[in-house]
Image (cartoon, rainbow, N blue to C red):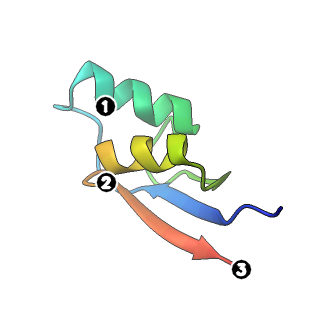
Amino acid sequence: MIMAKVRITQVRSKNGSTARQRANLVSLGLHRMHQSVEVELTPVTKGMIQKVLHLVKVEELN
């Protein structure tokens, strides 16, 4: 079974965010502004993205 993939790009600074939000960014593989990563869309990653949605841009990949 093929999982959907998404591209996540950090578009806002993590300054002023909580420690939990910063940990979610690191877990997703984002370490600096305008960095993009491609991850499989699982329930775990969906939850992490939801917690930092105000800091990132999410694009679906085919």
Q: Nearer the viewer, mark 3 or mark 1?
A: 3
Q: Which percent across, then down, holds residue 26?
A: 50, 29
Say which quarter of the image contains residue 6.
Answer: bottom right
The answer to whether mark 3 and mark 2 are in CB contact below 8 A is no
Instruction: Look at label 2 and name its amino acid.
Output: Leu
Query: In the image, what residue occupies the spot 31% across and 31% down?
Result: 21
**Number of residues whose C-alpha sits closer than 10 Å to that of mark 2, classed few (under 14), some (14–19) or many (20 or more):** some
Q: CA distance from mark 3 to mark 2?
A: 21 Å
- Residue lying farthest to the top in this orientation: 19
Mark 3, other Cα within 10 Å: few <14 / some 14–19 / many ≥20 = few
Place of residue 50 in the rendered image (x, y in percent of width and height, measured from the top left): 34, 50
- Tell me the crowding category of disc 1: few under 14, some 14 to 19, or many 20 or more residues within 10 angstroms, Cα based: some
Q: Quadrant of residue 38?
A: bottom right
Q: Which mark is residue 53?
A: 2
Residue bearing mark 1: 21
Q: Callout 1, which amino acid? A: Gln
Distance from disc 3 to disc 1, alpha carbons, whole Å, reads 28 Å
**Image quarter of the N terminus:** bottom right
Q: Dot 1 lies on which element?
A: helix
- Where residue 31 sits: x, y (%)? 51, 34
Location of residue 7 with respect to 46 vertically, above or below: below
- As helix, strand or loop, the secondary structure at mark 2 comes to loop
User: 12 and 39: which one is in front?
Assistant: 39
The mark that comes first in sequence, 3 or 2, is: 2
Q: Is residue 55 visible?
A: yes
Q: Earlier in the sequence, mark 3 or mark 1?
A: 1
Which dot marks residue 41?
none
* Residue 52 appears in the rendering: no
Circle 3: residue type: Asn
Q: Which residue is mark 3?
A: 62
**Tag 3 secondary structure:** loop
